Image (tube, rainbow, N blue to C red):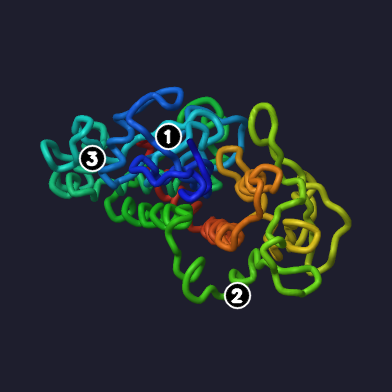
């Protein structure tokens, strides 16, 4: 069972866990020790208790060029978090049996292949450092490379037909610099974790102006104003399907005539969007690239809206949910500002031909 929050589940049982449903979109799920869903995976659930998290990848893309193909998550999640089947690799593993907690009769270990261990040791990592978690730099390096537009463009054909493969840096210093970028990306993608100067503390302009929620008439918001009545989503026979809600497009400060989503790419200049919850309330000033940002074929912000439309959720957003949309837009905008660093990092790593 998946729900928006524990209060909606009608229970506070021990099995309720945070659950990644879509990129930048977490829910609460009731995870039980038995086949409540289509298949029970007790080994996967046990690995959550290591605290290290999971690398999530897919075997092939829905179509070439559909965005980032790799995530790191602290939680288990939906099989379709990357649109097609998602594969969850624990960054650490445990051999504890069901009913035993970590540290009782077992240990946790890095989940690295013999080839990965040889690579790390060749860079000067000691077995003790690897055992203590420093070897996880290799996973965060992969996350940084996966987010580089140059990597996605140069490897589009491969990513469409097989799991991602990543070039490895030639030195420990370069690996750790790349891993630092990956950790920043992970922090930005974890909607539960506040990010200073992005979602917490003083958010400087112009980032602080991204996706501010405002009313068309300037009057204060009420609870009813947070109903998403524009047709962003609806229930169907096969679940929730997205719709085309209301957006208003600005280019270089001038209002454009009605522009469809698929036409935004061809509107030159500095383009921002106002995205409407309903006829009176909207999120203002979302950069075009932020609105179009996709992870594994999911247009993140549009997908988020499709599951929160009144026709699907059966209630208005609460204040925290409305704020989360704004914060997600700022997270994505910050990721997009890292493009030059990510592409430069990929070019440096690509000087070594080894693949992971």
Q: Left of 112 or right of it: where is 339?
A: right
Q: CA distance from mark 3 to mark 1?
A: 20 Å
> Label 2: how many residues lie within 10 Å, few (<14), some (14-19) or many (20+)?
few
Q: Nearer the viewer, mark 3 or mark 1?
A: 3
Residue 17 seen in the figure: yes
- Which residue is found at the position 76% from the left and 57% from the top? 278
Tag 1, which secondary structure? loop
Q: Looking at the rendered structure, which numbered label has been put on residue 230? A: none
Residue 351 seen in the figure: no
The tag earlier along the polypeptide, 3 or 1, is 3
Q: Looking at the rendered structure, which numbered label has been put on residue 110? A: 3
Q: Nearer the viewer, mark 1 or mark 2?
A: 2
- Which residue is found at the position 65% from the left and 51% from the top? 315
Q: Quadrant of the C terminus?
A: top left
Q: Which residue is mark 2?
A: 205
- Which residue is found at the position 42% from the left and 52% from the top? 186
Q: Which residue is mark 1?
A: 165
Single out the residue that lies furthest toward the right. 257
Q: Left of 44 or right of it: where is 280?
A: right
């Amino acid at each position: 069972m998946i729900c928006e929050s524990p209060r909606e589940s009608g229970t506070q049982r021990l099995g309720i866990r945070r659950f990644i449903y879509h990129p930048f979109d977490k829910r609460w799920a009731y995870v039980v020790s038995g086949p409540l869903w289509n298949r029970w995976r007790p080994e996967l659930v046990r690995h959550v208790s290591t605290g290290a998290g999971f690398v999530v990848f897919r075997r092939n893309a829905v179509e070439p060029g559909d965005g980032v193909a790799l995530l790191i998550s602290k939680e288990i999640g939906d099989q379709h978090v990357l649109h097609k089947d998602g594969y969850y690799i624990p960054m650490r593993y445990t051999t504890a049996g069901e009913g035993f907690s970590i540290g009782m009769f077992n240990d946790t270990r890095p989940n690295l292949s013999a080839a990965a261990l040889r690579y790390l040791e060749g860079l000067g990592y000691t077995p003790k450092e690897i055992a203590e978690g420093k070897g996880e730099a290799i996973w965060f390096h992969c996350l940084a490379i996966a987010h580089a537009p140059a990597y996605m463009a140069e490897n589009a054909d491969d990513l469409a037909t097989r799991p991602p493969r990543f070039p490895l840096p030639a030195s420990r210093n370069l690996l750790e610099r790349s891993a630092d970028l990956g950790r920043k990306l992970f922090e930005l993608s974890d909607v539960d974790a506040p990010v200073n100067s992005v979602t917490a503390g003083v958010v400087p302009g112009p980032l602080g102006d991204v996706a501010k929620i405002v009313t068309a008439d300037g009057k204060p918001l009420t609870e009813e104003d947070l109903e998403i009545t524009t047709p962003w989503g609806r229930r169907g026979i096969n679940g929730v399907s997205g719709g085309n809600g209301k957006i208003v497009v600005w280019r270089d400060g001038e209002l454009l005539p009605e522009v469809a989503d698929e036409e935004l790419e061809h509107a030159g200049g500095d383009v921002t969007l106002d995205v409407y919850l309903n006829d009176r309330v909207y999120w203002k000033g979302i950069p075009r690239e932020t609105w179009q940002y996709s992870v594994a074929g999911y247009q993140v912000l549009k997908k988020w809206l499709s599951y929160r439309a009144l026709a699907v959720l059966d209630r208005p957003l609460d204040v925290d949910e409305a704020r989360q949309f704004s914060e997600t837009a700022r997270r994505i905008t910050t990721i997009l500002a890292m493009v030059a660093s990510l592409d430069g990092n990929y070019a440096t790593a690509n000087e070594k031909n080894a693949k992971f």
